[in-house]
Image (tube, rainbow, N blue to C red):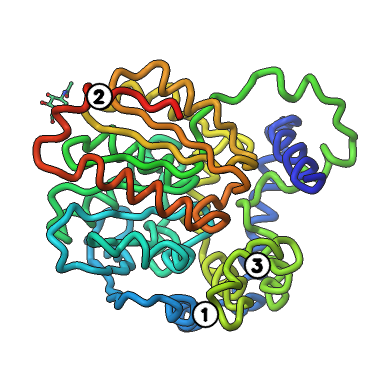
């Protein structure tokens, strides 16, 4: 908790000192040096990422198919989306999974069997992440968001999926909501797992706290870098760094994995490559915890016929008040659930409870004509 608070304070202060010209110069200089060092320092390898992913997914009982979906020149010149598909033969409405920052398809390993039992499930590596292509995104926050969402839509077209249930975790939840606003006719149910980027950034948050100079100085130096810079900077020690910093992340998966360290290997390889998706996140964020264009301000644009289920981790750092606000303001179906004992990685922390909630949400509107009866279901305030 203490560590989180310090990191939180650090991130809040990211925008504290604004010496524009000096800042720009340092930014350009450090980024240049950083990329040059990175090119020979980092032991990243696309084939090691593939191996780590395969090792993790070998714990699945359901057969899966992995493939690249060619979505063409969306952001780069030839973008490809890495896709894992399960139970494709099922005639039920498919479920599509969007991971959070720094993650990828393999970290759904505790969910895929349960979620694919009744319906097709597709997990994708978002454009700029995991094994998908890594084109450079726009430096405009709304445009970068649009590009990430467009990639999902182009993927859907290529897959010839008419309508699906869309589940996003953290940043994936932010993008899932953005997708649903843009393409409501495609979304049967929007499921947001501890979504990032919903609440607005409080204006007085920095002024209220007495932040020591050292913390401000560190935050100032860190500012030019994307969130996972330390992992990449650590090069050969990146994987060990993940294990030291987040032993809990690795532990979450230990019940199903023979060698849980493969999780840190996977996360390292996901983030050691050219961080273009992470750059897009950096563009969209305002002090890590907040989005420059918060989703709460825009969620009213989402067609009220699209049902929303929000699953929050009871002890997550994400501000879950956004869920209540959506429920209070929205006339359509909104179900907010708090999963007690779960942190931000709610899908892994309490995978059984999470899977049950998701499956219940999937069934709820997966019958022809039931979306019209939405109002009779009312709002579940449980
Ligand atoms: C919302 O969706 C319904 C069903 O798809 C559609 O008939 C309606 O026109 C949409 N409303 C708006 C405001 O787009």
State ligand 1's quadrant: top left
Q: For mark 1, give the secondary structure.
A: loop
Residue lying at 78% horizontally and 20% vertically, measured from the top left: 207
Is residue 140 visible in the rendered image? The answer is: no
Viewer-proximal residue among 225 and 196: 196
Residue lying at 51% horizontally and 42% vertically, measured from the top left: 194
Residue lying at 36% horizontally and 48% vertically, measured from the top left: 167
Answer yes or no: do the residues labelled 2 and 3 have beta carbons within 8 Å?
Answer: no
Quadrant housing residue 223: top right
Mark closer to the chain start, 2 or 3: 3
Residue lying at 79% horizontally and 20% vertically, measured from the top left: 208
Name the residue tied to disc 3.
251
Indicate the quadrant containing the N terminus: top left, top right, bottom left or bottom right.
top right
Viewer-proximal residue among 204 and 39: 204
Cα–Cα span, label 3 and label 1: 24 Å
**Quick check: is the Cβ at mark 2 less than 8 Å away from ligand 1?**
yes
Above/below status of 292 relative to 365: above
Quadrant housing residue 99: bottom left
Answer yes or no: do the residues labelled 1 and 2 have beta carbons within 8 Å?
Answer: no
Name the residue tied to disc 2.
304
Name the residue tied to disc 1.
45
């Amino acid at each position: 908790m203490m560590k989180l608070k310090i990191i939180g304070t650090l991130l809040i202060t990211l925008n504290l000192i604004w010496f524009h010209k000096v800042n720009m110069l340092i930014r350009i200089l450090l980024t240049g040096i950083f990329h040059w060092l990175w090119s020979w320092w980092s032991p990243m390898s696309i084939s090691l990422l593939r191996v780590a992913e395969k090792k993790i997914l070998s714990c699945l009982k359901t057969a899966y198919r992995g493939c690249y979906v060619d979505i063409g020149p969306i952001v780069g010149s030839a973008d490809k989306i890495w896709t894992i598909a399960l139970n494709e033969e099922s005639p039920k409405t498919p479920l599509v999974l969007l991971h959070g920052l720094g993650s990828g398809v393999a970290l759904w390993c505790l969910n895929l069997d349960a979620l694919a039992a009744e319906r097709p499930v597709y997990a994708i590596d978002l454009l700029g992440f995991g094994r998908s292509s890594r084109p450079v995104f726009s430096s405009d926050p709304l445009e970068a968001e649009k590009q990430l969402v467009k990639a999902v839509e182009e993927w859907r077209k290529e897959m010839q999926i008419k309508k699906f249930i869309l589940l996003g975790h953290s940043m994936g939840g932010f993008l899932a909501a953005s997708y649903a606003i843009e393409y409501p006719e495609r979304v049967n149910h929007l499921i947001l797992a501890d979504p990032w980027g919903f609440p607005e950034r409080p204006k007085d948050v920095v002024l209220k706290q007495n932040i020591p100079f050292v913390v401000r100085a560190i935050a100032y130096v860190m500012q030019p870098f994307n969130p996972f810079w330390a992992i990449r900077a650590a090069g050969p020690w990146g994987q060990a760094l993940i294990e030291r910093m987040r032993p809990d992340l690795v532990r979450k998966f230990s019940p199903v994995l023979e060698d849980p360290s493969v999780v840190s290997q996977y996360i390292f390889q996901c983030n050691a490559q050219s961080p273009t998706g992470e750059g897009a996140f950096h563009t969209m964020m305002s002090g890590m915890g907040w989005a420059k264009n918060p989703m709460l301000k825009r969620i009213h644009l989402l067609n009220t016929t699209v049902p929303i289920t929000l699953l929050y981790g009871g002890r997550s750092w994400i501000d879950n008040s956004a869920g209540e606000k959506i429920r209070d303001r929205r006339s359509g179906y909104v179900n907010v659930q708090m999963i007690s004992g779960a942190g931000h990685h709610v899908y892994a922390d309490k995978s059984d409870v999470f899977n049950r909630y998701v499956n219940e949400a999937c069934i709820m509107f997966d019958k022809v004509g039931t979306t019209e009866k939405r109002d009779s279901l009312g709002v579940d305030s449980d």
